[in-house]
Image (cartoon, helix red, strand yellow):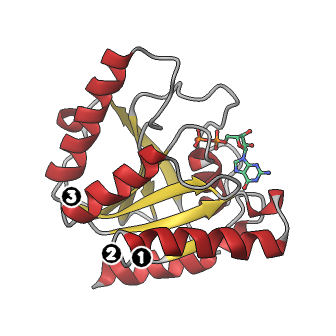
Amino acid sequence: KPVKKAEYLLSAPDLDHCPAGDKPEICFAGRSNVGKSSLINALTRRKRLAHTSNSPGKTRNLNYYVIDDSWYLVDLPGYGYAKISKKEQARWGREMKRYLLERKTLELVVVIVDIRHKPSVLDEEFMFWLAENGIPFCIILNKTDKISKTRVLQQKAAVSALLENMNIEVPVFTVSAQTPETIDDFFAFAMDFMQD
Ligand code: GDP
């Protein structure tokens, strides 16, 4: 089991309420409903550590989990949720950017995308923004169980081509939250990355 211990710590409305930067952290980002919570549960092999839901966009907080007493896993609020006002969305965009730029102990951002759809304009802009600001990230294409193996390869190639177009070189992982072992490669990469 890759993760031995996982505990929910706190929910922070913004950077100022995040815990003391006493551990390195990795954050999960992506549109609402891509499966961030499900992936946290799969990664930690816990059924309900993070609350999954069919009503996207409910969590507007940064949710902190302590993993193996040694690092933080942070669930960022999903972006692009249409049912909140433009003004709220803009405010959240600013808060997220502030966290991503100023959180000194943040080591890696994981951009999660639903593999069935090509990355949205928002996803593309987000990836470009991360690259532009020199924030290390990787990509997880989730929900591979929903499409054929051939289609998984096609979608992965499409995302790789998109990244190449933007001159961005980052790893792309294909996983399903329903099959926790599919996340092991990503996990090994993330642990190596934090060591360096
Ligand atoms: P979040 O908003 O990004 O945290 O997304 P959730 O983890 O709440 O997942 C949104 C919905 O997608 C839920 O109904 C999940 O059960 C479902 N889901 C998430 N990951 C997968 C996956 O890999 N495969 C399938 N089939 N469903 C998934």
Mark 3 Cα shell of 10 Å, populated few (<14), some (14-19), many (≥20): few
User: Could you tell me the amino acid type at mark 3?
Assistant: Asp
**Quadrant, the N terminus:** bottom right
Query: How far apart are the alpha carbons under marks 3 and 2?
Result: 34 Å
Query: How far apart are the alpha carbons under marks 2 and 1?
Result: 5 Å
Q: Please report contact status of discs 2 and 1: CB closer than 8 Å, yes or no.
A: yes
Q: Is residue 174 visible in this depiction of the protein? A: no
Mark 2 Cα shell of 10 Å, populated few (<14), some (14-19), many (≥20): few
Which residue position holds label 1? 164
Mark 3 residue element:
loop
> With respect to residue 22, does 83 lie above or below?
above
The percent coordinates of residue 164 (x first, y second) are 41, 76
**Quadrant, the C terminus:** bottom left
* Residue positioned most to the front: 165
From the viewer's perspective, is the residue at label 3 or at label 2 nearer? 2
> With respect to residue 9, does 160 lie above or below?
below
User: Could you tell me the amino acid type at mark 1?
Assistant: Glu
**82 horizontally vs 156: left or right:** left
Ligand 1 neighbours mark 1 (CB distance < 8 Å): no
Which residue position holds label 3? 22
Q: Quadrant of residue 60?
A: top left
> Looking at the image, which is closer to me, 75 or 100?
100
Q: Please name the residue shown 78% across and 69% down the image.
A: 151
Q: Please name the residue shown 27% across and 55% down the image.
A: 129
> Looking at the image, which is closer to me, 120 or 145?
120
Q: Please report contact status of discs 1 and 3: CB closer than 8 Å, yes or no.
A: no
| Residue 167: mark in rendering | 2
Q: Earlier in the sequence, mark 1 or mark 3?
A: 3
Mark 2 residue element:
loop
